[in-house]
């Protein structure tokens, strides 16, 4: 089972490190990362594997929520299927 | 992995453009709850509802968290209660109170199915149920009622039309101290769909399985935003953009419905592909029409624009789902749509134009506030006109008008929440249709009914 984490906001130091740390604490394995600057906004998208037994999705979500408040960026985590169903036939 | 553009598009749709799953509605058959003792019957109804839908709200919330998509309402539709009344007799309001209590226990905001199907005539329980509707709506909070008074196959039951005009007025009078909320929960249908997940007209048809999950999607804001990116496109391209957007929206409904059905252990019924507006800014069907090029919704050109929108939504949605059903099309409820409210306030959008619009989109005259002193026969005549459009065009039409007791044209009625607010609209009451309505009988089924 895979989920997509998206981070949007003003670029600053250590974003990737902080998000990765939360993933690692929650046993979510990062399989892919892309980042870019879109319309002056820093956008990072991570594909994470959340099938590990020790990974609790709702816990990961709330940790990411706390991190978002702390660094003042918008962080979302959504199951990969929503993108599969919307953008693939 | 998906492209950054795809991922950002989905996130933007949800966060900025009000994309959501409007409702997961569990349809539950109550046929096996019938008992000749009404109290025993009510007990069985309560037990069955709380047993089957016990996890509905929790499951909805879990799915919402997993996919990051808001699921606004979790609701229940039941077998038309008139059928239970036929067996049990007694005061039908007891059923309404039972449904309300079950809805409260389950934490759902609306339960539909306080209904009767009388398109060709009344059977046992039907008249009693119709007579009890105003009281049932006034003494409960979450119960929604609907009555099917006509169909392409059966014609229009004008005796029922006459009764429903009176029921609408009485429902408003009994709830005059609560912004006339009663008739906002009452829909009069022609060709009512039996798997519609949207309130207030949802009920669980007798041809349906014992328990099913139906999903209603939404997304007028997403369609409008997609069109805004094509200011110079011609109408072929516009239709294409709408189709593609409807496809994406519907795919999400399909995903959520499939997941909910798996988790609840209940078969998946249908996705209803409707564009359902809310009073929230940017979530308006009227604004889509204005984006296409009308200065206001309701001016000349509105019907053509809406016809194209409705058709493109269906074309895009139908490929995205394994089973499409319900109402599927664009909704035009006046009080629930910021653009419609504005156009009605300005006097640009009138009842006659809305009637024309209902001949090319789903549903009918919906959430329209009319003067409180409108005679019941005029409301019956509005219902008959609307039913005739449905009957002849083999489509669903409905009437949900709210007589605002004590208010006149120009005043406003405020419901709050998803039901919104609306100005009292002008209706033509100078001459009376009473003779026509009082004749009674049935408008025979049209030639369109003879398809065999």
Image (cartoon, helix red, strand yellow):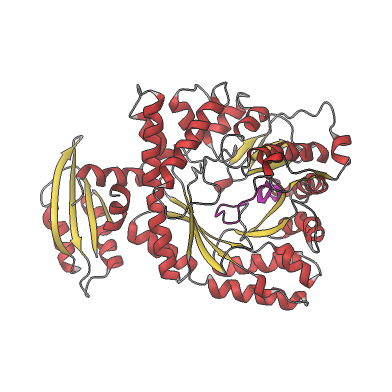
The answer to whether residue A79 of the structure is visible from this angle is no
Q: Would you place residue B93 above or below residue B237 in this image?
A: below
Where does the magenta region start and end? Answer: B179-200
Residue B36 image offset from top left, x and y in percent = 78, 76
How many numbered marks have been drawn onto this rendered protein structure? 0
Residue B258 image offset from top left, x and y in percent = 41, 62
Drawn side of residue A79 relative to residue B182, left or right:
left
Drawn side of residue A33 relative to residue B30, left or right:
left
Drawn side of residue B244 relative to residue B423, left or right:
left
Q: Is B192 part of what is drawn in magenta?
A: yes
Drawn side of residue B305 relative to residue B150, left or right:
left
Q: Quadrant of residue B30?
A: bottom right
Residue B119 image offset from top left, x and y in percent = 74, 51
Nearer to the camera, B33 or B54: B33
Task: In the displayed orientation, state which residue is furthest to the front.
Answer: B452
Q: Would you place residue B157 above or below residue B429 in this image?
A: below
Nearer to the camera, A70 or A55: A55
The answer to whether residue B79 of the structure is visible from this angle is yes
Q: Residue at x 78, y 40 (%)?
A: B380
Residue B327 image offset from top left, x and y in percent = 55, 47
Q: Is B414 part of what is drawn in magenta?
A: no
């Amino acid at each position: 089972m895979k989920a997509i984490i998206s981070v949007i906001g003003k670029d600053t130091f250590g974003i990737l490190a902080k998000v990765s740390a939360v993933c690692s604490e929650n046993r979510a394995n990062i399989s892919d990362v892309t980042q870019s600057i879109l319309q002056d906004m820093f956008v990072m998208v991570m594909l994470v594997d959340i099938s590990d037994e020790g990974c609790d999705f709702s816990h990961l979500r709330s940790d990411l929520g706390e991190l978002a408040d702390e660094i003042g960026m918008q962080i979302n985590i959504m199951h990969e299927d929503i993108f599969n169903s919307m953008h693939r036939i | 992995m998906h492209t950054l553009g795809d991922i950002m598009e989905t996130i933007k749709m949800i966060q900025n453009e009000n994309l959501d799953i409007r409702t997961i509605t569990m349809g539950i058959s109550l046929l096996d709850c019938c008992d000749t003792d009404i109290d025993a019957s009510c007990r069985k109804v309560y037990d069955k509802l709380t047993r089957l839908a016990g996890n509905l709200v929790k499951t909805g919330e879990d799915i919402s968290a997993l996919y990051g998509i808001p699921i606004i309402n979790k609701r229940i539709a039941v077998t038309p209660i008139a059928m239970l009344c036929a067996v049990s007799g007694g005061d039908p309001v007891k059923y309404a109170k039972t449904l309300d209590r079950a809805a409260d226990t389950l934490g759902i905001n609306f339960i539909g199915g306080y209904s009767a199907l009388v398109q060709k005539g009344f059977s046992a329980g039907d008249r009693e149920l119709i007579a009890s509707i105003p009281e049932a709506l006034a003494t409960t909070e979450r119960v929604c009622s609907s009555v099917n008074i006509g169909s392409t196959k059966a014609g229009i039951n004008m005796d029922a039309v006459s009764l429903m005009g009176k029921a609408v007025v009485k429902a408003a009078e009994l709830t005059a101290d609560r912004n006339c909320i009663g008739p906002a929960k009452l829909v009069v249908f022609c060709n009512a769909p039996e798997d519609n997940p949207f309130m207030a007209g949802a009920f669980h048809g007798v041809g349906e399985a014992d328990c099913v999950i139906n999903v209603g999607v939404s997304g007028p804001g997403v369609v409008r935003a997609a069109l805004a990116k094509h200011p110079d496109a011609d109408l072929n391209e516009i239709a294409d953009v709408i189709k593609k957007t409807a496809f994406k929206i519907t795919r999400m409904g399909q995903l959520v419905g499939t997941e909910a059905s798996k988790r609840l252990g209940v078969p998946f019924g249908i996705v209803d592909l409707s564009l359902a507006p809310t009073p929230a800014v940017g979530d308006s069907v009227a604004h889509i029409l204005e984006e296409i090029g009308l200065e206001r919704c309701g001016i000349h050109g509105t019907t053509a624009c809406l016809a194209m929108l409705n058709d493109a939504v269906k074309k895009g949605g139908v490929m995205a789902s394994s089973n499409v059903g319900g109402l599927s099309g664009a909704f035009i409820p006046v009080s629930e749509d910021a653009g419609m409210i504005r156009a009605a306030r300005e006097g640009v959008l009138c009842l006659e134009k809305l009637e024309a619009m209902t001949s090319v989109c789903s549903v009918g005259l919906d959430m329209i506030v009319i003067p409180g002193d409108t005679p019941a026969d005029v409301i019956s005549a509005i219902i008959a006109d609307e039913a005739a459009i449905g009957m002849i065009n083999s489509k669903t039409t409905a009437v949900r008008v709210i007589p605002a007791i004590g208010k006149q044209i120009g005043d406003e009625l405020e419901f709050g929440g998803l039901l919104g607010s609306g100005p009292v609209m002008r209706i033509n009451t100078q001459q009376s249709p009473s003779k026509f309505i009082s004749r009674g009988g049935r408008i025979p089924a049209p030639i369109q009914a003879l398809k065999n």
